[in-house]
Image (cartoon, rainbow, N blue to C red):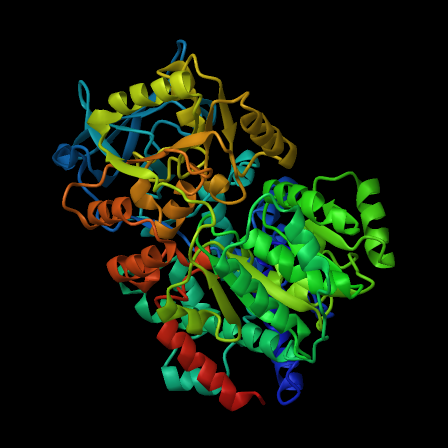
Amino acid sequence: MFLTQSSFRKQAYQALIHSAKIGMYFENTFRLAHPFMSRPIDSRLDFLSPVSRVPGLGPKRAEALTASGQATIGDLLYYFPRRFIDRSTITPIGKASEFLDSICSVIGAITRTRVERGRRPRLRIQVTDDTGTIEVLWFHGVTYLRDSLRTGMRVLLTGKVSKYTSVQMVHPLIEPIGENRSGPEITFLPRYAITSAMRDAHVQQRTMSKSIVWILENLKHYPNILPAAIEREKGFPPLSECIRQMHLPADPGKLDLFQARLRYEELYRLALTLRWSKRKFILPGRSLHAGSLPDRLKSQLPFSLTNEQLEAIAVLHQDAASNHRMHRLLQGDVGSGKTVVALFACLPALNSGYQVVWLTPTEILAQQTYEIADRWIRPLGVTVGMLKGGMESGEKRRIQQVLDSGEMQFVVGTHALLHPLIRFKKLGMIVVDEQHKFGAQQRLRIQEKDPAGDFLLLSATPIPQTLAKTLYGDLDVVSLKSSPVVRSPVETHIVPEQKRAAMEEFIINEIQNRGSQVFYVAPRIEADEEEEEGIADVQSLFRELTKGPFSSVKTGLMHGNMDADEKQNAMARFASGEIQLLVATSVIEVGIDISAAHIIVIENAERFGLSQLHQLRGRVGRKGDKAYCFLMTSAVEGSSSQLRLKQFCKEHDGFKLAELDLSLRGPGEVAGFRQWGWEDLQLADILRDAGLFREIQATIDTILPR
């Protein structure tokens, strides 16, 4: 990757540095805060220090953390726990039976240890205090635990209490504890999200906790992010105390003030970045005209454009002809024909001898867009190419050269296009497809390829009108609300668990008798013992379906952790009909157009926002055929989640669904703020905190010149 997941936090401060009014002040004040600047000469531990400076984080672990977005000490400190295990109350072992199927903590001495051999070895120990004895079992890590635990050792256990022949705990947390201690050193134990890369490198919860504690004890220099006047006015605690409390709270129920400061800082950085983006690109544009290319393109299309599409194209061509740079958002509902409208928007640049770059979030979408451009744009005499991260280095260099020389006029690609070495001879149009999949800094970076180039964002996730001005106040918006294809609404049903078998029988009949293809979507890639139970993952789901009711169905698997070739191969096999049922994550929500896909099943549907559900539902029935969407849910009848899903079943207008999600769930949960491209935020929610965001923008207006 050319941009790390933490790039926003690292580069947001650049917005400050570019302000002439306060540039030198911020450069000196913030030098510790952003790793893209040169490091200080001294070697003090600071936010810029690599995680390899932490004892216990060797090369493999440091590499895994970096791949997970935690490259520096600062990144790690902002990797906040998802939850805490409360160990504030110690229960006498004799009373542990009162906590059956609940979690409690006990302290006692190990009185017996035994490894029980068999097909599945396990370690069994007994822990005793003055009030009784409890049995403890482990099936994993037997060798390590056997070597670490000894008779007579005093330990603290935290886990779920169960009863087989006696009271016991299975796989509890265990911590040696000295004779003079009556409780744990860390009362509220933090639990962090562990990525697959971290897990493979043996970065476990214990590793994370020890690393964070070491950093908090040894880090002496914290960046001054907020101006002192704002800190005083808001009564914010010091940044060091806020970060400490987020990891090691005195009381997790009293974090509001500490979170408030960190939330304010996140929005402050974002507002500065967007402010800089807006100021930097309010520049003169070029007056470009499409000439005869629109008529030539229309003659090639196997369909007629709708009046709404023609109106949108006229607006975009008017933008291109203006002496001001185009800065527009084209948003449209599922199947509204945004891609073809955006292709027409590129014609003025191509006709005037300028190049076009089309940025997509996934290689699958890049491939499909390239094929469309190759089919419709190349016959106009335009050279069309594609750049993806998975390409051979020689092919990448060739594309880099022909873009630099101007030989390639139209290029489609993924994040690889953001690399500094990718340059254009005459760039006239920048298109960012599925723009909500990109962070603010990534959108800024592609614009830097030519600040005078017209800029068009595409989004299939409609933004509620009540929030559009806050989120994209610097963009002009044009919307497509109707579909050029007369499509029957996808028949949508909530399926309770007791009707799963009937649904599966219906799907098998559709596959056998109609030749239907099926998407089967789960919310996560693999099971996570840190997550709540009952959440489907594609790995387990794939195994269950292929061994169970769909054992005779040709089934494939696709998720975000697969490499590009594997995903492309799975999608190619599905598109050709070789695969009849595709088990996938929400990675299929955009850029997937399979004409024979008539059914989609969404597990744990209550965990998705309505806009995302609408995107997923839009993958089926794309040619107007009868199609079905089945929502599997454990939501209780009459609950707010059930009500939301029932309304989703009735509504098929993406714009109305966006407003509905806002009214039902509140602005903090509309499709998740990550759906809108604000994935760089951790504590702040750009929708819930819209009022605070506007307040911060007003504050910045008083500091920076317009």
Q: Which residue, as the protein is rendered here, is positioned at the far top?
A: 118
Q: Residue 312's x, y, as percent?
A: 53, 64
Image height check: is 2 above or below 225? above
Q: Residue 454's x, y, as percent?
A: 66, 68
Q: Residue 222's x, y, as percent?
A: 54, 70
Image height check: is 238 above or below 310? below
Q: Nearer the viewer, residue 568 or 343?
A: 343
Q: Residue 655's x, y, as percent?
A: 37, 58
Image height check: is 67 above or below 699? above
Q: Nearer the viewer, residue 364 or 593?
A: 593
Residue in the picture at 44% in, 43% down:
205
Q: Nearer the viewer, residue 441 or 652?
A: 652
Image height check: is 376 above or below 419? above
Answer whether residue 212 is visible to the viewer in this image.
Answer: yes
Q: Which quadrant: the C terminus?
A: bottom right
Residue in the picture at 37% in, 34% down:
627
Residue in the picture at 41% in, 21% down:
514
Answer whether residue 2 is visible to the viewer in this image.
Answer: no
Query: What is the total number of numbered labels drawn onto the structure image?
Result: 0
Residue 30's image quarter? bottom right
Left/right of residue 564 with respect to residue 333 in the rendered view: right
